[in-house]
Image: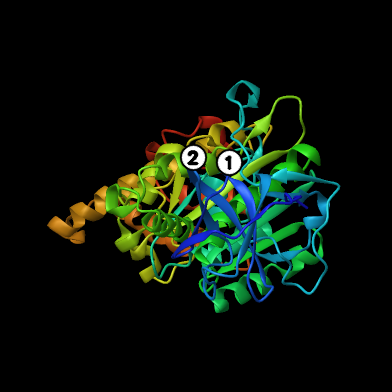
Amino acid sequence: MTAFGEIEYTGLRELRGPLAVVGPVSGVGWDEFVRLTLGSGERRHGLVLEVDRDLAVVQVLEGTAGMELTGSRVAFAGSPLRVPVGPGWLGRTCNGRGEPIDGGPPVFGASTAPVAGAPINPVRRDPPAEPVLTGVGAVDVLTTLVRGQKLPVFSAAGLPHLELAVQMAAQATSGGEPFSVVFAGMGLTHADAAFVREALAERAEAGELVLLLNTADDPVIERILTPRIALTVAEDLAFGGGRHVLVIMTDMTAYAEALREVSAARGEVPARRAYPGYLYSDLASLYERCGRISGRPGSVTVVPVLTMPAGDITHPVPDLTGYITEGQIVLSREVHARGVYPPVDPLSSLSRLMRKGAGPGRTRADHLDVAAQLLAALARARQVRELADLIGESSLGATEHRYLELDAAFARRFLDQRPDENRPLAAALDLAWDLLLGLPRGELSMLPADLLDARGAA
């Protein structure tokens, strides 16, 4: 627990949204942890956002509703917010502030760590390597996730991004080594929060999951804190406990909107679409906490999930996220409308570090070649589809018709799987081979001849 100083201030000057202005104060620093005691005896907590001469602006984690300017006392800890860390988090379900909501005792640890954290020093980084398999065929074959990578999911309202995030959290593994998942939900409805808890109950009971759930009616400040606590817990499990940790954060758009609300309450000059000008650096301070550290076991892999307002990929949140991260998995309304789950758009999706974690000695020797050939075939099928729309399918040649058949079979046989289906990588690659062997051998120029001979390509 953070120790608070003996001096308590009663000079509450102003309440502005989730913010409280305290003054006059002295010796107070930015990002200090704060305890507020209301006249009723209720205790709330906050963080110092800004100090201007003798005034401190405090963001109140539980919100300022019910607070009054008179009768409240404020104490400053003299240090940033810290949380206990260690394996005690595994199997626990907490709210966005890290307080248990599973009926258990508070989470204890042998030590504490600052929630703010810090990006890994580039000099001490090891490059990402080895795959994290999710059991989702489209992800594992075409956009392989790699230990230490940050790979976002770009979605839109109405698409099953939460179902995909939960499926990845429930099924992910990493080569039989100690593995854990930290799931941070932000701005969830109560129905969605209940769905997440139920779907991940088995992993939680196995002691492999940390669940942080911030619901839409929770204070907006809590939403800003949730991913930071999640990453702080993950860093200790990885670099202190030698585990490979997958952190899934959904929905980062809800996080960014909370950041915008606090920025507006502070009276800051808005930037693009009223988001604060520091949105890029703020997102980077989260995403860059993943990776591998030289000389230490364990890794932190981050999958941020975000919804693109109106499906606009140039919106500031996905746009800035794309600059920081190493690829993206894009969900498609068109694929979803065809009743396919997960509705991944393979030609818009990319894992820039896939070659670091897939191929001989890591997944399967033919993995990279098959993935490249399948993407090339899908790109060609899209061109054929556009041509067919112009001149009619009856005017296409036999090879073009084979490409159209591959495109339809890709969605129906390869892409589509149940939300609770854990598809092995070998089975997914064999499905990809079945699709490719429907094309003439002369069209499979990206596959080595010995592989084609072994598969009996005609």
Residue tagged by mark 2?
Answer: 284
Q: Is residue 72 above or below residue 232?
A: below
Image height check: is 29 above or below 304? above
Q: Nearer the viewer, mark 1 or mark 2?
A: 1
Instruction: Specify the color scheme.
Output: rainbow
Which element carries disc 2, helix, strand or loop?
A: helix
Marked residue nearer the N-terminal end (1 or 2): 1
Q: Is residue 214 above or below residue 142?
A: below
Q: Where is residue 393 in the image (x, y as percent from the top left)?
A: 21, 60
Q: Give the residue at x 55% y 49%.
A: 48
Assess whether mark 2 and mark 1 are in contact (beta carbons under 8 angstroms).
no
Identify the secondary structure beneath mark 1: loop
The reply to whether residue 431 is in sight is no
Q: Which amino acid does label 2 sit on?
A: Ala
Seen from the viewer's position, the closer of residues 176 and 316 is 316
Give the Cα separation between the discs numbered 1 and 2: 23 Å
- Relative image position of residue 204 (x, y in whole percent): 76, 64
* Location of residue 10 by image quarter: bottom right
Q: Which residue, as the protein is rendered here, is positioned at the far left?
A: 391
Above or below for 212 versus 317: below
Considering depth in this image, is 304 or 129 the residue closer to the camera? 304
**Left or right of 12 in this view: 102:** right
Q: Nearer the viewer, residue 179 or 188?
A: 188
Residue 29, numbered label: 1
